[in-house]
């Protein structure tokens, strides 16, 4: 059984765009910096985000535990 001469060309045509995409991705993703030095990375902002996430999780936990429709409550329903 002979190898069809179109197979190597078809494999190359499929592999070249994938290889170029991987090289481009590696070139762009290689310069990622750690969180230090980026805006909003200071301790106060991170603590504020953490507190905000805790409030959201508390609201979701409360909504999961009740049979009420918490979406129809009055707006200032903070604890």
Image: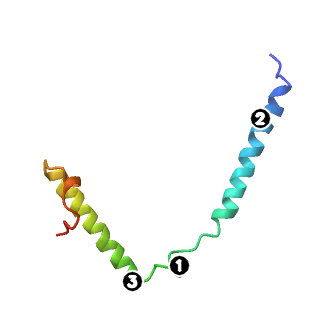
Residue at left 69%, top 52%? 22
Q: State the quadrant of the N terminus.
A: top right
Q: Could you say where residue 60 lies in the image, as x and y percent from the top left?
A: 24, 57
Q: Is 3 situated left or right of 72 in this image?
A: right
Q: Position of residue 6 (x, y in %)?
A: 84, 26
Name the residue furthest front.
74
Q: CA distance from mark 2 to mark 1?
A: 43 Å
Q: Which residue reaches farthest right?
A: 5
Of 59 and 21, the residue lying toward us:
59
Q: How is the image coloured?
A: rainbow
Whichever of callouts 2 and 1 sits on the residue coming sooner in the sequence is 2
Task: Tell me where residue 55 sits by quadrant.
Answer: bottom left
Q: Reading the chain from its start, which is encountered first: label 3 or label 2?
A: 2
What residue is rendered at 79% in x and 37% in y?
A: 13
Which of the two residues, 7 or 45, is positioned nearer the viewer here?
A: 45
Badge 3, how many Cα within 10 Å: few under 14, some, many 20+?
A: few
Q: Secondary structure at mark 3?
A: helix
Q: Position of 17 compared to 54: left or right?
A: right
Q: Is mark 2 in CB contact (under 8 Å) with mark 1? A: no
SS at badge 2: helix
The residue at which mark 2 appears reads as: 11
Q: Which residue is mark 3?
A: 43
In which quadrant of the rendered image does the C terminus lie? bottom left
How many numbered markers are drawn? 3
Question: Which of labels 3 and 2 is toward the front?
Answer: 3
* Residue 8 versus residue 72 in the image, above or below: above
Residue bearing the label numbered 1: 38
| Residue located 39% across and 83% down the image | 43
Q: Secondary structure at mark 1?
A: loop
Residue at point 80%, 28% (across, down): 7
């Amino acid at each position: 059984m002979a190898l069809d001469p179109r197979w190597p060309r078809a494999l190359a045509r499929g592999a070249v765009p994938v290889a170029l995409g991987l090289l481009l991705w590696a070139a762009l993703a290689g310069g990622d910096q750690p969180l230090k030095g980026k805006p909003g990375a200071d301790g106060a902002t991170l603590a504020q985000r953490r507190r905000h996430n805790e409030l959201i999780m508390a609201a979701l936990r409360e909504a999961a535990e009740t049979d009420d429709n918490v979406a129809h409550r009055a707006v200032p329903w903070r604890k």
